[in-house]
Image (cartoon, helix red, strand yellow):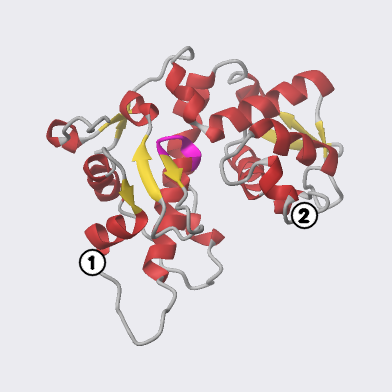
């Protein structure tokens, strides 16, 4: 059974959550401007997307990261913003009205309360969103056993673990052959489990120096994991080795 502890608005661990920070920044924009202008296809307009890229400071999707491959930014170019937009609509925290995105009363009630944002949005984001839909493969299998994932990660990422190690612990070693091949299981583990946990702020991803392969990236629990989660394996987790 996965249980979330209530996180106080003043808890410094909330700084680790890009999702909470992005939603707070979005509500701050609305407070100042009255709404977020939408394109005819109901995406956020570029002026907000450019502002969000700078303000959200989303790991792996910073302003520098995004403009390194784009001259201008549309909402689909900033994947976390697109997810955040869809999430707020799905949870009825915001709505589209007369060409603008505006918070609903439920969304307004979260303004200024990052702990409440975390407690309301993160469980929905992790457990109700189909993360497999973000895969490049239409028939990607859905990995759904969050109870197993979180309890295993609770122990394995205490001192940090590579994506490849977590793949082997959860699913066994990948098949080998004479030529390198894409490990779809590793890809889906990253897309459906590890990346959502990083975006929620429960894990932190440290990129490998050699590149961006998720097998080589290091994943470690953040202070927010300990502040927010109550898991069956808590009693078996030893304190991290500090150097």
Looking at marks 2 and 1 on the same chain, the residue that comes earlier in the sequence is marked by: 2
Judging depth in this view, the residue of 194 and 9 nearest the camera is 194
Residue occupying the point 33% across, 60% down = 164
Q: Which mark is residue 3?
A: none
Judging depth in this view, the residue of 1 and 158 nearest the camera is 158
Quarter-of-image position of residue 37: top right
* Secondary element at image label 1: loop
Determine crowd level at label 1: few under 14, some 14-19, many 20+ residues with C-alpha closer than 10 A.
few
- Residue contact at pointers 2 and 1, CB within 8 angstroms: no
Determine crowd level at label 2: few under 14, some 14-19, many 20+ residues with C-alpha closer than 10 A.
few
Residue occupying the point 40% across, 71% down = 183
Direction top: furthest residue: 10
Left or right of 153? Residue 186 is right
Q: Residue 36 at x, y = what percent?
A: 80, 33
- What residue is shown with label 2? 70
Q: Residue 218 at x, y = what percent?
A: 38, 48
Range covered by the magenta-colored residues = 199-203
Judging depth in this view, the residue of 197 and 72 nearest the camera is 72
Which label lies toward us, 2 or 1? Answer: 2
Left or right of 27? Residue 6 is left
Magenta span has 236? no
- What residue is shown with label 1? 172
Q: Residue 234 at x, y = what percent?
A: 19, 32
Magenta span has 202? yes
Q: Report, in whole angstroms, how far the alpha carbon at label 2 lies from the one at label 1.
A: 38 Å
* Secondary element at image label 2: loop
Q: Residue 38 at x, y = what percent?
A: 83, 42
Image quarter in which the C terminus is found? top left
Residue 157, compared with residue 164, is above or below; it is above
Left or right of 37? Residue 9 is left
Image quarter in which the N terminus is found? top left
Residue occupying the point 44% across, 44% down = 205
């Amino acid at each position: 059974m996965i249980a979330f502890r209530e996180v106080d608005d003043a808890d410094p661990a909330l700084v680790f959550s890009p999702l909470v920070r992005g939603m707070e920044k979005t509500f701050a924009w609305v407070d100042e401007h009255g709404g977020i202008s939408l394109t005819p296809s109901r995406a956020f307009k570029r002026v907000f997307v450019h502002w969000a890229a700078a303000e959200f400071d989303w790991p792996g999707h910073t302003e520098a990261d995004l403009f390194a491959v784009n001259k201008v930014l549309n909402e689909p170019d900033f994947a976390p913003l697109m997810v955040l937009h869809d999430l707020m609509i799905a949870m009825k925290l915001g709505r589209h009205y007369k060409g603008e995105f505006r918070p609903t009363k439920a969304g307004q009630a979260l303004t200024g309360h990052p702990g409440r944002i975390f407690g309301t949005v993160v469980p929905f984001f992790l457990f109700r969103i189909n993360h497999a839909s973000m895969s490049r493969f239409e028939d990607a299998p859905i990995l759904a056993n969050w109870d197993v994932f979180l309890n295993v990660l609770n122990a394995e990422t205490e001192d940090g673990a590579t994506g490849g190690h977590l793949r082997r612990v959860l699913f066994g070693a990948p098949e080998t052959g004479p030529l390198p091949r894409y490990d779809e299981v590793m890809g889906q583990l990253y897309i459906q489990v590890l990346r959502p946990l990083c975006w929620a702020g429960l894990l932190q991803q440290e990129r490998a120096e050699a590149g961006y392969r998720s097998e080589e990236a290091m994943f470690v629990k953040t202070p927010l994991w300990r502040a927010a989660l109550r898991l069956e394996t808590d009693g078996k987790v030893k304190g991290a080795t500090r150097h």
